[in-house]
Image (cartoon, grey):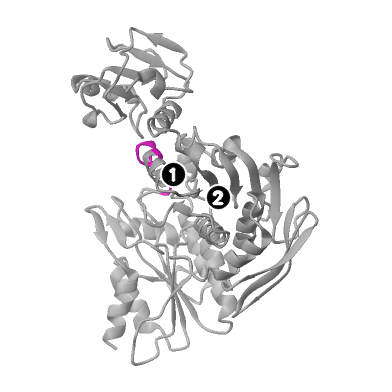
Amino acid sequence: MNIRELLRGVVPLRIKGELPSDISSLSCDSRRTEKGSLFFCLGGIDLEGEAFLPEAAAHGAAAVVASHPLESPLPQIIVSSPRAAYAAAWNNISRRPGERLRLLAVTGTNGKTSVTYLLRSIFRAAGISSSLIGTVGGDMTCPDPDVLYPLLSQLADSGREAVVMEASSHALALEKLHPLVFDVGVITNITRDHGDFHPSAEAYVQAKASLFDRCRVGLVGLDSATAAPLLDLLIPGRMLGYSAAGASGAEFSARGIIRSEQGTEYELVYGEGIFRVHSPMPWRFTPENTLAAASAALAAGILPRDVRTGIESLTLIPGRLERITPRTRTPMGEIYVDYAHTPDALGKAIASLRDLYSGRRITVLFGCGGERDREKRPMMGAAAEQGADSVIITSDNCRSEEPMLIISEILSGVLHPEKMTVISDRREAIIAALDRLEPDGVLLLAGKGHEEYIIDRDGRHRFSEREIVSDYAKGR
């Protein structure tokens, strides 16, 4: 592979030494570097990338890409961002797949998965072959470049016309998407999350907003309490706003919202146009999510009739207030799983169930992930206490942390910890919740949603909340 073709679009600040004309492979992992590799010094959580260069050189690296000159005999390409260069190289080796696809990206603290599923349904209604890249079905929301760009190329080669992606703040901050240009980008909302990764709330907002640097049209949800920093991004014709709550300055608005057991309805108003939208999903966040998807689709040139059909035909989004209905001889009450793992998402999920099941007792079971944002743990406790009638606090992907330490930090945010039930083993907690569930009660299993695994200090293990509920029901 010709090294200059691989680095097309990358502007070196300096070249040190004589570069080889060809390289055998790309690598950012010294353990997987082979003879003739171009090694990228990306760095890890605790170490700079140059710390791994001696091992990469020992494995036969032919040259290195770095952010500054290194004490190494290897030829060096000095660039402002090795991560951007790494993404560009994989984009080039994959034959620049973004140029062969319609690309849409959705970022935001909550709602990314729902909006991407809605967009795929709208594309299907419009007769456009599309695929999703996101949280459901993958180990990470946005794959690393060595997976992402070959995948995009494969999708383009197979005849896909469009790809809808979840763009996480991690992916944006780590410049995984640097070479791509999106037809439409959406920021749904920005609330508390990922304090373990971003050095400040401002850095988190900046990472999300950087999506618009690579979008032809950008859409901003104006209903978030923290939308203010994004308002300066609005540019008529290019950066647009949408609102389901009557925010001023919105080019796309939901008017006359009606939610019932039959779903959600409203009039979508944009420019000179107006049409009625119906979604079979009755949740409190449905207007915001459907409006985001509809606005993005309209901005991408999809006809209103296809937008309406696509939204109306989507009845379920995996792990997003997904109802579980196990076979049982006796009534068990209503059971839902949801991916809610932020205070805002948990509060809205509980409130949505409260809207639908007014007057019925709601129990929420949840935990917080280990080695993740610790500051949101007490906020999660407060959200659960404020919204639910009964709360069971348990573990959720504790990783190397002690489950009871995480639980104690959750409890620090509640006013009446003595009213909380604590069962650290999640399976036992679910069974206890099912034991207590009355026929007219409602149980929300929050945090895992679509996930079919749990992570502890011993690694990842299969863990299906649906199977636990099903097995329990068989014994009734």
Q: Secondary structure at mark 2?
A: loop
Please report the bounds of the magenta region as a residue range: 141-149
Q: In the image, what residue occupies the spot 26% across and 86% down? A: 475
Residue at image position (19%, 23%) is 59
Report x, y in % for residue 106.
Answer: 54, 49
Identified by mark 1, the residue type is Ala
Where residue 327 sits in the image (x, y, percent)? 34, 85
Is 329 in front, or is 406?
Answer: 329
**Circle 1 — which element?**
helix
Q: Amino acid at mark 2?
A: Gly
Q: Is residue 86 magenta?
A: no
Up/down of 307 relative to 154, above or below: below
Q: CA distance from mark 1 to mark 2?
A: 26 Å
Mark 1, residue position: 156
Tell me, yes or no, if residue 285 can be seen here: no
**Residue under the image location 68 percent in, 52 percent down:** 222
Give the residue displayed 45% in from the left and 19% down from the top. 79
* Quadrant of image for the C terminus: bottom left
Query: Where is residue 264 drawn, in percent x and y?
Result: 63, 72
Q: As drawn, which residue projects farthest toward the bottom? A: 329
Q: Residues within 10 Å of mark 1 (few under 14, many from 20)?
A: many
Nearer to me, 77 or 475 = 77
Residue 108, disc: 2
Q: Position of residue 410 (x, y in %)?
A: 43, 59
Which residue is most to the left? 58
Residue at the far right: name it: 272
Q: Does the image show residue 55?
A: yes
Dividing the picture into quadrants, the one containing residue 216 is top right
